[in-house]
Image (cartoon, rainbow, N blue to C red):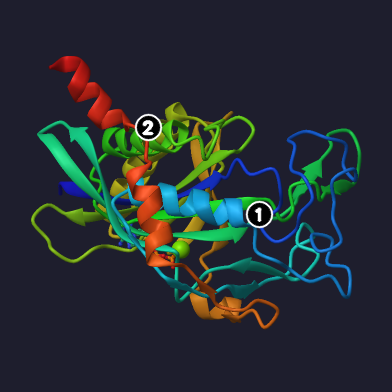
Amino acid sequence: MSYEAVIGVEGHARLLSQSRLFWSGGTMFGRSAISQSWPLCLGLPGSLPVINRTAVEMAVRAGLALNCTIATSNLFARKNYFYPDLPKGYQISQYEAPICEHGWIEITASEGKKRVRIRRAHLEEDAGKNVHVTGTNGSRVDLNRAGTPLLEIVTEPDLRSADEAVAYLKGLRDVLMYLEVCDGNMDEGSFRCEPNLSLRPLGQKEFGTKVELKNINSFKFVKDAIEYEVKRQTKVLNEGGKIRQETRLWNIDRGETAVMRSKEEAHDYRYFPDPDLVPLKLDKEWIKGFRSSLPELPAARASRFVS
Ligand code: ADP
Ligand code: MG
């Protein structure tokens, strides 16, 4: 049986703001573990979030460059889960009212130009990082990153191959770097991506069950992990098996994916509007001002150079 791959990508871009998303303290990569942890990001009682204007501006500019509609009314929600790198016990994110929706990016696919639809892009704070030190029997928690501003950018399942996924991610990264809203560094995790992938028999309309891929920090690994996963899922289906909806980690040394956890559902997170934050209203004229001041974007520059 021949199958077609169906891929949608979730990307995270660390916004190049000096401050946290909801706190005025700074955000340098690689500082010592406690030097940049702020009361709010440590979950200390009594600390209250205040939205970072620069991060909002960067999200608006990115949304405009990605052909999105910008929401004039924004809500922030608490996404609740327990993990050692998340002292508050919830991440402040956007759920029902993301700042950007319904955009697209054009890529060059094997059959020519193709639009990849962007479902939404929303603001959220990053978590800290668990550090597993080899040769010791413990792990450490580094909270320096907790609370740094991210833009999560989610596509529709419009991609059909590893090459298309890489073309999309390169295009997205270029746009964000041209706008100077993200440094694009994949090693340091400033630009991260999680492809979702399913297979369907050629000609079938309905999508199959998807698997989410994590631990991918280069374009080469995007390609390798997707190609591996296409082979794995093809084998499972051809042997009469079923794909389980799960999150799988790319193992660089073994060149294969392995189950991390079965996939959680949105309702598991008990999203609700953060009562510490008022709805964020954006002025239409303010948004318009950013549209007229966007720099020349990669696609426009490429066609200008060609002509
Ligand atoms: P979840 O709630 O599991 O994160 P979403 O609906 O938010 O799922 O989609 C996450 C990503 O997975 C999106 O980029 C979307 O385009 C993609 N996606 C959704 N369904 C499928 C599918 N059946 N196959 C491949 N990708 C999919
Ligand atoms: Mg999702």
- Tag 2 residue: 170
Query: Does mark 1's beta carbon lie closer than 8 Å to ligand 2?
Result: no
Is mark 1 in CB contact (under 8 Å) with mark 2?
A: no
Q: Residue at x 15, y 49 (%)?
A: 1
- 34 vs 260, left or right, is right
Residue 114, horizontal then vertical, whole percent: 16, 41
- Secondary structure of the residue carrying tag 1 is loop
Q: Is residue 26 visible?
A: yes
Q: Is 83 placed above or below 169 here?
A: below
- 85 vs 271, left or right, is right
- Tag 1 residue: 126
Residue 227, horizontal then vertical, whole percent: 35, 36
Residue 107, horizontal then vertical, whole percent: 23, 36
Q: Is 231 placed above or below 147 here?
A: above
The alpha-carbon separation of the residues under discs 1 and 2 comes to 22 Å
Q: Is 95 placed above or below 193 here?
A: below
Quarter of the image where one finds residue 299:
top left
Residue 39, horizontal then vertical, whole percent: 86, 61
Near-viewer residue (199 or 287): 287
Residue lying at the far top of the rendered structure:
306
Residue type for callout 1:
Asp
